[in-house]
Image (cartoon, rainbow, N blue to C red):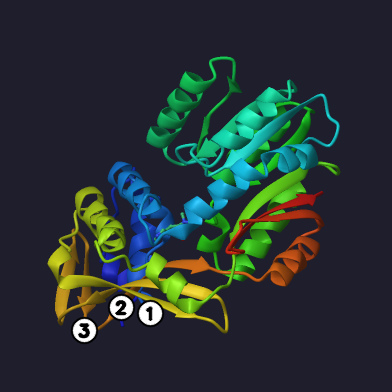
């Protein structure tokens, strides 16, 4: 096993991509190789993720869309909580397909609100803004490009209006449960008593359905994972041979952890400008966690992070939940 220092040799990483480079080298030189899934979303990654969302086996998007569409009246009633004007801050807003029904429902209630979508991807924020304004030119929208908490704190400091922080699409599942708890605690610290959050959780269910969602036969999820290696080649000057890796997904019903890996098909070495990473045949890179929760685990997370659970909205199959918690 290489140390970070050995792998980096003496040469410095390119300045602009420093953090990305450090994270990649750190992950690939750890005992069990891993890469942070937050780097999946370059322009091509955004495009492949849209294909995943449209894929038959990937039930999450359809289940949540059903909730936000069919129960939007109740959700709007719950999150508005009598306020005349308020702000909706959405973390990881994506292309807006998740949110559009809710924003529409709120707009039709005639209450004034400002929508502040936060995303790390400028591409996707532009697409989102164009889409939403095309549907509703009156929408008061202020896109914020950057890291979640930096932007959340900025949004909170800009006005004293009541906030509803949304984190939809089971994005919270892409953190291990202990990080998810910390994440919710951090949101709670940023907002004021009486503010609310609306969070989308994918629920535990039969393991076949879960595994199928992350191992589609068309190979879209495979391409999604390989795209990160491609991105590392392009942006960090590595020479990953994409043909030497294959996607593998596991789901553990005992812990609710669904994990994606890329498996090296043979012993080989990948070179970076200032590092060499050795792979054995069958060695895995852990690419992503997509954690599944039970309803009681979700309520417990609310309490442990300083929120009061208010309402739970599930789809007709009981596969997905959007929950409202109050600070
Ligand atoms: C963005 N996130 C909630 C997706 C998920 O379900 O974990 C990302 C994804 N990875 C593979 N398929 C979808």
> With respect to residue 235, does 178 lie above or below?
below
**Residue 223 image point, x, y percent:** 25, 58
**Residue 160 image point, x, y percent:** 79, 28
The reply to whether callout 2 and callout 1 are in contact (CB within 8 Å) is: yes
How many angstroms separate mark 1 from mark 3 (CA)? 12 Å
Q: Is residue 77 left or right of residue 201?
A: right
Q: Quadrant of ligand 1?
A: bottom left
Q: Mark 2 points at which residue?
A: 284
Label 1's element? loop
**Residue 51 image point, x, y percent:** 32, 49
Q: Is residue 181 left or right of residue 80?
A: left
Q: Mark 1 points at which residue?
A: 32
Label 3's element? loop
Mark 2 residue crowding within 10 angstroms, few (<14) / some (14–19) / many (20+): many
Q: Name the residue under label 3.
A: 280
**Is the residue indicated by label 3 positioned so its CB lies within 8 Å of ligand 1?**
no
Q: Is residue 147 left or right of residue 24?
A: right
Q: Residue 24 carries which label?
A: none
For residue 4, say whether it is visible: no
Residue lying farthest to the top in this orientation: 138
Label located before the other in sequence (1 or 3):
1
Q: Is residue 277 left or right of residue 248?
A: left
């Amino acid at each position: 096993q290489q140390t970070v220092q050995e792998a980096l040799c003496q040469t410095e990483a390119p300045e602009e991509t420093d953090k990305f480079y450090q994270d990649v080298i750190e992950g690939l030189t750890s005992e069990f190789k891993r890469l942070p899934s937050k780097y999946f979303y370059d322009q091509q990654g955004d495009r492949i993720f849209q294909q995943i969302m449209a894929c038959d086996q990937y039930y999450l998007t359809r289940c949540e869309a059903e909730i936000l569409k069919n129960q939007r009246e109740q959700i709007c009633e719950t999150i508005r909580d009598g306020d005349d004007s308020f702000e909706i801050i959405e973390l990881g807003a994506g292309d807006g397909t998740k949110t559009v029904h809710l924003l529409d429902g709120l707009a039709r209630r005639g209450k004034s609100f400002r929508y502040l979508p936060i995303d790390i991807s400028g591409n996707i924020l532009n697409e989102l803004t164009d889409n939403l304004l095309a549907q509703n030119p009156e929408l008061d929208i202020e896109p914020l490009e950057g890291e979640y908490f930096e932007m959340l704190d900025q949004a909170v400091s800009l006005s004293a209006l009541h906030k509803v922080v949304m984190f939809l699409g089971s994005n919270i599942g892409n953190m291990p449960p202990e990080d998810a708890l910390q994440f919710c605690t951090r949101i709670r610290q940023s907002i004021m008593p009486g503010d609310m959050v609306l969070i989308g959780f994918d629920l535990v269910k039969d393991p076949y359905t879960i595994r199928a969602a992350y191992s589609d036969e068309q190979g879209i999820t495979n391409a999604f994972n390989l795209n990160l290696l491609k991105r590392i080649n392009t942006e960090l000057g590595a020479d990953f041979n994409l043909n030497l890796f294959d996607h593998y997904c596991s789901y553990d019903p005992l812990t609710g952890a669904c994990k994606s890996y890329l498996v090296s098909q043979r012993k080989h070495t990948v070179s970076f400008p200032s590092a060499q990473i050795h792979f054995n045949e069958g060695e895995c890179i852990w690419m992503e966690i997509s954690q599944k929760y039970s309803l009681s685990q979700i309520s417990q997370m609310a309490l442990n992070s300083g929120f009061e659970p208010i309402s739970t909205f599930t789809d007709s199959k009981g596969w997905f939940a959007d929950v409202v918690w109050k600070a």
